Image: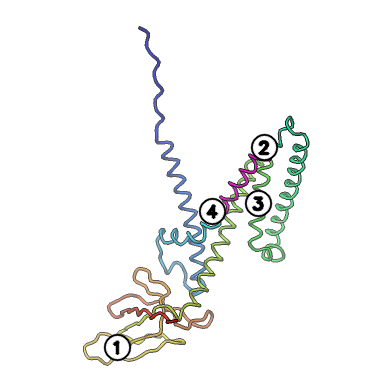
Amino acid sequence: MGAGKQSPEPAAPWPRLVALLSEAAVISAVLYYFGWVRTAATYDRFGVSLSLLELASADYILRSINSAFPPLIGLGAVLVALAAAHRRWVAPAMDPGRQHRAHRIARGAIRVVTVLCALGLAVVALGVAAQDAVGKPLGWWLPAILTVAAAGLVYVGSTTGTSSPVGATVLPALAVIGGIWLVTVHAHRTGNEFGDRFVAGLPRQPEVVLYSAERLAIAGPGVGVAPIEQEGSRFRFRYSGLRMLIHTRDRYFLVASEWQRGRDATYVITSTEDTRIDVITRSPVSR
């Protein structure tokens, strides 16, 4: 009897596993960066450096969810819609053997897209070169134009088969850079908006009462200090009217209940045996 055909050996799972781990590492790094941008924008309004917070990587990734996911999900939805439109209308029209008139219309639309995308890249180059005159007034439109223009030229090249080696490398990179830039701008704006909402809601936040064995240089609108004369108590002073900005490890970042940017300080209290923090939840307002 002749020897039967040997069945092919199953592919080793290691390359796929390595690819999945690499993708997870890249996604985690991107989310970490967006979370870092969002957190820095929030606490910069209170004059607090991120080096003082000593946040973990997971903290930044969690803070990136509301700043990175909405634009990324929106971008994914747009790409899915454009891919469906390409399969339904553009791809059939690009075949000259089927519909001659539709083919001419599709070729004309491709030329218009090419010109518009080239003009978009020129605007981006001008905005980068002249930040004060062009770049800053455009704001988030600048990275949006870069993303759309570069991605549009990539699409034109792949559809018409005219993509050059340089364009096939540079244009996708520019599209990715523009997307990251756009989400970064959104993350920064989200951080600023969160800081503004926090300041506006300070009177409704739980009150923080600080007990200290030594008198501290804490004052501000809405902050009160009272001596503690109880015998045997380690604490001698009670500070009220404070609000918790954030608590990290052994540090409490406190602000006055009527805190205003540029006028009031942010207090950094180290948790020791000579300090104690009490939190008093405020009763909901009856309507």
Numbered tag placed on residue 73 in the rendering: 4
Residue 79, x across and y down, in percent: 59, 47
Label 2 neighbour load within 10 Å: few <14, some 14-19, many 20+:
few
The segment highlighted magenta reads: 72-89
Q: Could you tell me which quadrant the C terminus lies in?
A: bottom left
Magenta-span inclusion, residue 42:
no
Say which amino acid is labelled 3: Val
Read off the residue under disc 1: 236
Of marks 4 and 1, which one's residue comes earlier in the chain? Answer: 4
Tell me whether circle 2 and circle 3 mark residues in contact (CB < 8 Å).
Answer: no
Q: Position of residue 286 (x, y in %)?
A: 42, 82
Q: Helix, strand or loop at disc 3?
A: helix
Which circle's residue, 1 or 3, is located before the other in the chain? 3
Q: Is residue 189 above or below residue 2?
A: below
Residue that label 3 marks: 148
* CA distance separating discs 2 and 3: 20 Å
**Mark 1 or mark 2, earlier in chain:** 2
> What amino acid is labelled 4 in the image?
Ile
Q: Which mark is residue 91?
A: 2
The 10 Å Cα crowd at callout 3, few under 14, some 14 to 19, many 20 or more, is: some
Residue 275 position, x and y percent, is 31, 80
The amino acid beneath tag 1 is Arg
